[in-house]
Image: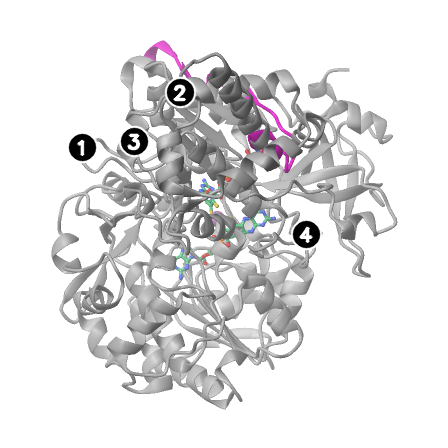
């Protein structure tokens, strides 16, 4: 029986990544936006000087390059935002909140842009119009009624501009709290934490230009074909000029295999495509730390052999001696870690591990890239430190063509952190704020996302304000996150589109409609630009291009200034004056954030300016003053104790990931082209042999439970089993549908990031509807 005959909606994709498939897809979404010609003009302005920064991912572009820089999924993001459909008061008259809850996430966002401020009326179970002033007054009233400022949670999603983020953190700190749960807590937190400890700065060290000079680029736990399509081009160029591109991913993601340039006429006409990798390793989920350690152990073995036979060193001793600390402990740990444990935990054979090490060794300059497959595990901080250890052994840091590249998610998630959206801010940062604004800045740690949910569940936090995002759906243990919001006295969502978090209201609730990246932002002194920071620490300006579809929408900075003014008056700044001209906000940023001196002048430079990176200059802002080797032992068992203590054994280990037609919780469509899935999202990718072993057939519908040693029953229902090319013992399902399975207390050590890529699950026969064909 062939796979297709069992499940007609699954058909492996044979085409190259990007190429014709991407063009067809862009055209479809573009026509669906209801204003295709306006949006085409907008699209041509994406990532151009004087245009707007793509609201898609945080990948950067070469500042010198004049090419049109957009990709299929960037085009989808632009079209999705720039729709002419409206979710206005008439819409909310038509539907009660209970009725809206019956709709899918896809349907909710598809209804269009939020166009006027709305307040929840519990008596009618509907959102009704409210004036901006009344909305601000309601927020101020709730905030001022709190016994202490830490009873409020101030969430940020990573699209907020630098200017909005800066105002937000200034307001919240002047109000008295560091409670800044943000999307980064669920995303690259482990990268920030581990890099901070290892190299003294929590950001990547490479720039766009380094990709042209690398001899090897490792791509670990990342699916750029879908999530960072503009990264495919430098990868392809690297393969073409003979560099190694080495992938670590349990799934043979199409977008890491072949690439056809949709803006390259000859390639499109001849239907040619280029290979995107030179080696592909498929580790166990969570197996990367062991794989990297095995590579380091091989290097050590080869170094000893080289020394014994008088050959040149494998290690860069000059670098190690001058710039690092802790190498002896680390090498001892390599000796103590057995080959067997490395093979078992990595899920890779010794031959493959040796091959990976050999590719690494042969390259003089290596860039290591990673994303969520590395950061959303129990031991992500240790895994990233292992990546750094490996790079330190050969001095692959702070020189051309070499370095570390955590590929960021949301388009300004890195900038938001730079601006101070941080639940654990540094004391130096707080000192600078205090000095500039002369108020007693709160010094205690605030809540991250997991802590914020716990605080709301316990009734300790009573007000939730969300600057963008979809808190209840993006967070783990979804029923608990919804309960957390419902427990609040006030929930405020500053958003562009309707989503499920708006439908779980506190006793009072507000929806405040904001401008997006594509919209013209007109203020008293004229149209305003905002700024963002990409994965390469480049800061550039973004100018909206489209007339907003409602005069009632406000910019994020204007909304935040309105809230701040209503709550704090003119303390510590005249909020409303700042809004007239965002240059005034940038002056404050220049005064308080290192690297931003002369901000208003430098941002006018075409392509923006480089913020600089201490580690890239081999300056180590760590307590030892050196780059630190971190000798973290391997986990004794990848399976956490709470799963082992649950009294049940797991059928499979599940990772949750993104389809090609979604942006986080925003679902653009029901297809996942590169994985061959059409018209459905409730699927469980599993190995054909595992499906049979567990007593099922491909195409059968199952319920999925997850294991943890508490008394919460975590279950999702009605998932179709897809026989897929995935290593034995592993499974994959889409985020956010699978989020109810992620236990809130299952998070990374030191990062508090939910372990969305490692969930122990059991399958059950679906209660009804056993097969759907
Ligand atoms: N179009 C689009 N673009 C996006 C987004 C989007 O949703 N849509 N989201 C944005 C955001 S916020 C982010 S953070 C990024 C996310 O970008 P990615 O990190 O690429 O996103 P995921 O879909 O979570 O993919 C994780 C990848 O890691 C692999 N993986 C899972 N577990 C492991 C493991 O243990 N080891 C290894 N080696 N690999 C593993 C999976 O097979 C998958 O290929 O993309 C950003 N860009
Ligand atoms: N199981 C599982 N869970 C995950 C992940 C996973 O891989 N697996 N990934 C995690 C990651 S990496 C991330 S980053 C988080 C994402 O978490 P969030 O950032 O909270 O979620 P998004 O889906 O990006 O938010 C979408 C909403 O943002 C609003 N929005 C869009 N643009 C704008 C804008 O310009 N301004 C404002 N104010 N609002 C806007 C719209 O209303 C839209 O509905 O989810 C995390 N959750
Ligand atoms: Mo993310």
Asked whether mark 4 and ligand 2 are closer than 8 Å, the reply comes as yes
C-alpha gap between disc 4 and disc 1: 44 Å
Residue at 62 percent across and 15 percent down: it is 351
Residue on which disc 3 sits? 210
Image coordinates for residue 403, horizontal then vertical, percent: 37, 35
The residue closer to the viewer here, 618 or 521, is 618
Q: How would you rate the neighbour count of disc 2 (Cα within 10 Å): few for under 14, some for 14-19, many for 20 or more?
A: some
**Mark closer to the observer (3, 4):** 3
Q: Residue at x 40, y 65 (%)?
A: 426
Q: Indicate yes or no whether the magenta region holds residue 717.
A: no
**Disc 2 from disc 4: Cα separation:** 39 Å
Which residue is disc 1 drawn over? 66
On the image, the x and y values in percent for residue 584 come to 18, 69
Q: Quadrant of residue 479?
A: bottom right
**Residue lying farthest to the top in this orientation:** 270
To which residue does mark 2 refer?
A: 363
Tell me the number on the disc at residue 742: 4
Q: Which residues are magenta?
A: 269-292
> In terms of sequence position, does the residue under pointer 3 or pointer 1 come before the other?
1
Q: In whole angstroms, how far apart are the C-alphas of marks 1 and 2?
A: 30 Å
Q: How many marks?
A: 4
């Amino acid at each position: 029986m062939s796979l297709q005959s069992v499940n007609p909606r699954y058909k492996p994709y044979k085409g190259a990544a990007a190429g014709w498939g991407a063009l067809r897809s862009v055209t479809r979404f573009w026509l669906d936006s209801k204003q295709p010609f306006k949006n085409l003009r907008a699209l041509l302005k994406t990532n151009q000087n004087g245009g707007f920064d793509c609201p898609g991912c945080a990948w950067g572009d070469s500042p010198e390059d004049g090419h049109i820089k957009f990709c299929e999924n960037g085009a989808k993001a632009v079209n999705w935002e720039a729709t002419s459909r409206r979710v206005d008061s008439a819409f909310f008259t038509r539907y009660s909140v209970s009725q809206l809850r019956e709709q899918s996430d896809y349907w909710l966002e598809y209804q269009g842009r939020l166009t006027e401020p709305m307040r929840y009326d519990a008596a009618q179970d509907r959102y009704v119009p409210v004036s901006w002033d009344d909305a601000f007054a309601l927020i101020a009233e709730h905030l001022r009624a709190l016994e202490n400022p830490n009873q409020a949670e101030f969430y940020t999603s990573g699209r907020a501009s630098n200017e909005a983020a800066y105002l937000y953190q200034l307001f919240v700190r002047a109000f008295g709290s560091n409670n800044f749960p943000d999307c980064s807590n669920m995303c690259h937190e482990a990268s920030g934490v581990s890099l901070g400890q290892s190299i003294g700065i929590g950001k990547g060290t490479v720039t766009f230009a380094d990709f042209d000079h690398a001899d090897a680029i490792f791509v670990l736990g990342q699916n750029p074909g879908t999530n960072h399509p503009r990264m495919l081009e430098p990868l392809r160029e690297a393969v073409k000029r003979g560099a190694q591109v080495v992938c670590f991913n349990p799934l043979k993601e199409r977008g890491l295999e072949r690439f056809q340039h949709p803006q390259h006429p000859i390639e499109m006409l001849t239907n040619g495509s280029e290979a995107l990798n030179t080696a592909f390793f498929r580790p166990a989920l969570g197996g990367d730390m062991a794989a990297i350690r095995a590579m380091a152990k091989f290097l050590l073995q080869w170094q000893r052999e080289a020394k014994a036979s008088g050959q040149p060193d494998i290690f860069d001793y000059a670098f190690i001696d001058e710039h690092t600390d802790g190498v002896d402990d680390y090498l001892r740990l390599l000796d103590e870690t057995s080959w067997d444990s490395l093979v078992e935990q990595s899920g890779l054979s010794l031959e493959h591990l040796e091959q990976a090490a050999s590719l690494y060794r042969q390259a003089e300059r290596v860039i290591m890239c990673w994303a969520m497959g590395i950061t959303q595990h129990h031991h992500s901080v240790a895994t990233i430190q292992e990546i750094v250890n490996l790079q330190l052994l050969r001095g692959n840091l702070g020189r051309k063509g070499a370095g570390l590249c955590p590929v960021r998610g949301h388009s300004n998630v890195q900038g938001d952190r730079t601006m101070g959206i941080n639940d654990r801010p540094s004391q130096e940062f707080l000192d600078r704020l205090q000095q500039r604004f002369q108020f007693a800045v709160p010094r205690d740690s605030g809540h991250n996302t997991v802590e914020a949910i716990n605080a709301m569940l316990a009734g300790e936090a009573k007000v939730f304000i969300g600057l963008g995002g979809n808190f209840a759906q993006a967070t783990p243990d979804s029923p608990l996150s919804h309960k957390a919001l419902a427990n609040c006295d006030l929930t405020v969502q500053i958003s562009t589109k309707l989503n499920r978090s708006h439908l779980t209201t506190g006793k009072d609730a507000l929806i405040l409609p904001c401008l997006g990246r594509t919209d013209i932002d007109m203020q008293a002194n004229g149209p305003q630009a905002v700024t963002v920071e990409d994965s390469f620490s480049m800061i550039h300006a973004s100018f909206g291009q489209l007339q907003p579809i409602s005069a009632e929408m406000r910019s994020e900075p204007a909304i935040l200034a309105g809230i701040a003014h209503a709550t704090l008056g003119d303390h510590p700044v005249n909020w409303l004056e700042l809004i007239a001209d965002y240059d005034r906000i940038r002056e404050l940023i220049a005064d308080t954030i290192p690297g931003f001196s002369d901000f208003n002048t430098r941002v006018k430079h075409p392509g923006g300016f480089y913020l600089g990176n201490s580690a890239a200059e081999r300056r180590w802002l760590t307590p030892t003053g050196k780059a630190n080797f971190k000798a973290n032992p391997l986990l004794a068992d990848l399976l956490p104790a709470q799963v082992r203590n649950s009294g049940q054994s797991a059928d499979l280990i599940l990772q949750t990931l993104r389809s090609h037609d979604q942006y986080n919780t925003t679902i653009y469509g029901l297809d996942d082209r590169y994985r061959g899935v059409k018209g459905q999202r409730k699927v469980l990718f599993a190995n054909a042999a595992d499906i049979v072993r567990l007593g099922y057939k491909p195409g059968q519908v199952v319920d999925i439970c997850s294991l943890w040693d508490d008394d919460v029953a975590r279950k999702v229902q009605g998932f179709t089993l897809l026989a897929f090319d995935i290593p034995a013992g592993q499974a994959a399902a889409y985020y956010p549908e699978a989020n109810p399975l992620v236990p809130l207390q299952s998070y990374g050590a030191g990062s508090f990031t939910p372990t969305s890529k490692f969930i122990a699950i059991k399958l059950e026969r679906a209660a009804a509807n056993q097969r759907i064909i």
